[in-house]
Image (spheres, rainbow, N blue to C red):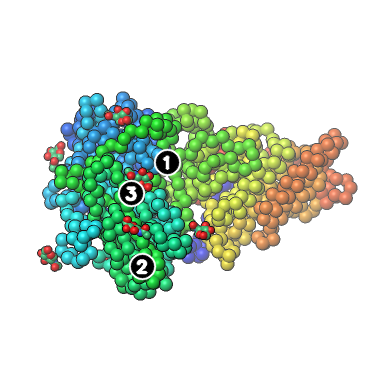
Amino acid sequence: MDTTYRQSASGTILLLLQFWCFSFLSIAEDIYDPTELFSISCGSSTNFSTLDRNWTADIHFLSPSSHLSFAARPLTPCTEQGPYTHARLSHSPFTYSFHLTPGPKFIRLFFYSTSYQNFNRPQACFSVKAGPYTLLQGFNASLNADADDDPSNSDILFREYCINLQEGEKLNITFIPSTTDSYAFINGIEIVSMPPYLYYTDPDDNSSEQPQYVGTTTPYVIENKFALQTMYRLKAGDHTISSSEDTGMLRTWDTDSKYLDTPSAESYEFTATTKLSFTKKTPNYTAPDQVFQSVRNMGMNGSNNIKNNITWHFTVDSGFTYLLRLYFCELNPRIDDAGLLRFIIFIQDQLATDWADVFLWTKNWGVPVVREYVVIMPENQKKVNLSLKMHPHPRSVISDIQINAIEIFKISNNKDSLAGPNPDPSTQTAVVNHQDSNKKSRASKKTLGAVTGSVFGVLLLTLFIVAFFLVKRKKNIAVESKKHRTSRGDGSSSLPTNLCRHFSIAEIRAATNNFDKLFVVGVGGFGDVYKGYIEDGSIPVAIKRLKPGSQQGLNEFVNEIEMLSQLRHLHLVSLIGYCYESNEMILVYDFMDHGTLRDHLYGADNPPLSWNQRLQICVGAARGLHYLHTGAKQMIIHRDVKSTNILLDEKWVAKVSDFGLSRIGPTGPSMTHVSTQVKGSVGYLDPEYYKRQRLTEKSDVYSYGVVLLEVLCGRQPLLRMVEKPQVSLVDWAKHWYEKGSLGEIVDPALKGQIAPQCLRKFGEVAVSCLLEDGTQRPSMNDVVGVLEFVLQLQLQDSANVNAVLESGGDYEDSGTENMFSSSHSSVHVSDYSNSSGLNTASYGRKESDSLLPELVFSEIKDPKGR
Ligand SMILES: *[C@@H]1O[C@H](CO)[C@@H](O)[C@H](O)[C@H]1NC(C)=O
Ligand SMILES: *[C@@H]1O[C@H](CO)[C@@H](O)[C@H](O)[C@H]1NC(C)=O
Ligand SMILES: *[C@@H]1O[C@H](CO)[C@@H](O)[C@H](O)[C@H]1NC(C)=O
Ligand SMILES: *[C@@H]1O[C@H](CO)[C@@H](O)[C@H](O)[C@H]1NC(C)=O
Ligand SMILES: *[C@@H]1O[C@H](CO)[C@@H](O)[C@H](O)[C@H]1NC(C)=O
Ligand SMILES: *[C@@H]1O[C@H](CO)[C@@H](O)[C@H](O)[C@H]1NC(C)=O
Ligand SMILES: *[C@@H]1O[C@H](CO)[C@@H](O)[C@H](O)[C@H]1NC(C)=O
Ligand SMILES: *[C@@H]1O[C@H](CO)[C@@H](O)[C@H](O)[C@H]1NC(C)=O
Ligand SMILES: *[C@@H]1O[C@H](CO)[C@@H](O)[C@H](O)[C@H]1NC(C)=O
């Protein structure tokens, strides 16, 4: 019975309140609301959303002179989220025009360096101009992509600039191929307004805190006429901050660790001990709170051994002037006065200050402060290292340094250019990387941050329901290409990665022949399930397409991705990926050849499963649930355990599926349950949960008990058109169990297969799962144990059973086991099978006669429609 049961409970209100609070928290992070935000997918003809950005087709922004440009798709699809499914390319210049308000803007360029139809990868070489500024000149995209010094090299190139627009200016961004043989291309452009004096110097502010030339006290004004290029945006510690976690400007913050030359330096996180007090000079949009809550210092060993500077090295283009913005905030309760912690800062081996004292600057804890220095890197080689060094001051009471974050910007030169030279081709890496990229492409750390961490951003903003995941595991979310998998076989999961792949809608359309009805293998209230093929038709997958526009569906869509992408187990169905694009919510799973367990128990035309097979399936599914309850970081309660949510693969291995309703279990030691709205499926609902709205893992145990009875008796949990005592499988089975005659109601198809002591044990564990008092029920671990034992017994006993079978098919153990004695009635059996068939017909629905499970989101099911 799939009819959804829902009940509102007063506990729910509390829970909702909690959710709302979290959602406000997440919104509150968007402190700055940009007046203009354009995310443009170049070459795309449709608008679509990735999880943190709404991408717009570029056609509205393309100037008429660009009619010679082409829109094309990459020949090697990019597995990253973002505007990489399309590009605009041309052998002649093309221009995007924007009407914008005056003021400073971020301009972000996204490139995916690969071959496109008729455009070969190495031929991409071009310049980019934005207004009067040259952003890139003679830019050989493949060369830059290959030379990326990040070892996890990628074909994605990301560039960020700041420019200031004057009144009445229209911004033109033009792409100009360098030679007649080469072409220009672009995958994505983003324009975001920023506060006026975030990076540019406020002319009315004559304080001494203006940027200074290193080694002098001469101020250096970041004038509006300059354009800036972001070279580095780093925070102390090992966590990145994704664009959706920024203060509203979609900046990403990488970690400083890979640029740090001093291994003994350590980083600390101060988690929300002191509320930050922002100032007029350093307002709340300057950087996300996490930036100020993580600090880099010398570490234990460093403090003992102060012979060395703490040193960072940043590779930059020579011949430009650079702005270094250093972020500080004192959160260490030990430092409660000026002079306790004083340190020296060197930039490019010149003294920036020998009186760096955060408490002196801020007079208090938790007050963020920024210090800016300007350094000229003389022209010599192409690339040079810019160094930042810090050292405790000899007179400091505490011998340490501290810093929270570092930003480095290149400042446009007197020709209004920011363009640096191409890197030197390194033949070896170029070849390796390019080959690599044909198989898979990975984003550089920077872009990965821009794209990944924020992947769930949009959904999270829209969905207060899932806000608690923000807190739980925001940083764990990774959406990256999942490599080819040859899963299954051994006892545990053989999957190498817990990452989950993003599919474009185009890939899904290709896999399903544009949602061809012939590919539909399951229909549910949520939408249809298709069998499709990916990887050039080599891998069959189940594609669950949710009905668009359903808010409920969206919650569960996100929930399922969240849950499944962190879970990998032989007995859990594997999520291959998802598509959230063009208003479509699609989930892609491993295809399960044998469909649902239910279809092999009753209601479909499949040959009956043997008792041994059934036991193996029961053991497998129980292991899957046991893993859910104990194997992941947090306990996960499935909440919708039923025979249609247990799927069978080609080797009859059971897989638990459908995590749309799943919940993280009680988290603290003092918490014994989660108060929540009652959800699940009628016939499987734990009465205790239903009565008290208290969800524990024992509710899954109850539902699983029902499944065990279905397996044993081969009937639905609830039958409506039968005599009262038979309506509920649970009541009926308990009744016969108590009479000691469970054999009476065993599935006739199992006649003669069950060893008597097996039946007794099996009945025992099933009935104990169904105890009214949840605390009395066994854990899934116990259930696994008993079922394994039953399976052992059964295997040992098969010879015996065969004997029994020959002697007339009685289950009875004529000796001591008479509690299970039965007088088998064949009339009864045929009655039962009739009633089952009749019942199915009379409800006018077929449970699922498809190849595929109904991967149903119970909550949004329409009972009438099924
Ligand atoms: C940020 O600061 C502004 C001005 O001080 C204030 O109006 C706003 O409420 C603050 N926002 C948050 C989220 O604290
Ligand atoms: C994307 O568009 C939707 C619908 O207009 C809106 O609710 C959402 O906030 C937008 N997301 C972003 C990141 O702008
Ligand atoms: C795409 O989005 C842009 C800007 O939000 C809007 O002007 C345009 O009408 C949209 N196009 C389509 C096809 O929805
Ligand atoms: C870009 O660099 C690659 C690698 O050095 C080279 O093969 C290619 O010819 C260059 N492209 C152009 C247009 O110069
Ligand atoms: C921008 O481009 C359009 C068309 O290409 C042109 O008419 C306009 O003059 C340009 N504006 C600026 C400020 O260059
Ligand atoms: C700051 O200095 C400029 C000239 O350097 C002067 O015009 C302006 O009035 C000063 N502003 C303040 C607030 O002192
Ligand atoms: C600190 O020094 C001790 C002993 O000198 C050494 O065992 C330990 O590994 C060092 N720790 C770090 C982080 O370098
Ligand atoms: C730290 O670096 C500065 C600048 O290069 C140098 O003058 C100083 O001697 C260094 N200090 C130590 C302890 O290495
Ligand atoms: C910059 O510093 C790194 C690490 O110290 C070094 O590997 C690299 O060769 C240096 N690059 C230049 C151009 O000096």
Callout 1 amino acid = Ser
**Disc 2 beta carbon < 8 A from ligand 8?**
no
Confirm or reject: label 1 Cβ below 8 Å from ligand 9.
no
Q: In front of the other: label 2 or label 1?
A: 2
Residue nearest the observer in this picture, 684 or 865:
684
Read off the residue under disc 2: 394
How would you rate the neighbour count of disc 2 (Cα within 10 Å): few for under 14, some for 14-19, many for 20 or more?
A: few
State whether residue 93 is above or below residue 319.
above
Q: Is residue 418 left or right of residue 262?
A: left
Label 3 sits on a secondary structure element that is strand
> Residue at the spot x=62%, y=60% of the render?
688
Question: How many marks overall?
Answer: 3
Label 2 to label 1: alpha-carbon separation: 40 Å
Q: Are marks 3 and 2 in contact (CB under 8 Å)?
A: no
Which amino acid type is shown beneath numbered disc 3? Phe
The residue where tag 1 is placed is 152
Which of the 4 quarters of the picture holds residue 842?
top right
Residue 194 in the image, given as x and y percentages of width and height:
24, 54
Residue 315 visible: yes
Amino acid found under the numbered disc labelled 2: Pro
Q: Secondary structure at mark 1?
A: loop
| Left/right of residue 845 with respect to residue 389 in the rendered view | right
Q: CA distance from mark 1 to mark 3?
A: 18 Å
Q: Which residue is mark 3?
A: 314
- State the residue in front, 596 or 849: 596
Q: Residues within 10 Å of mark 1 (few under 14, many from 20)?
A: few
Q: CA distance from mark 3 to mark 2?
A: 27 Å
Which of disc 3 and disc 1 is earlier in sequence?
1
For the residue pair 335 and 705, the one nearer the viewer reads as 335
Q: Is residue 166 left or right of residue 517?
A: left
Which residue is painted at 71% across and 42% down in the image? 615
Q: Secondary structure at mark 2?
A: loop
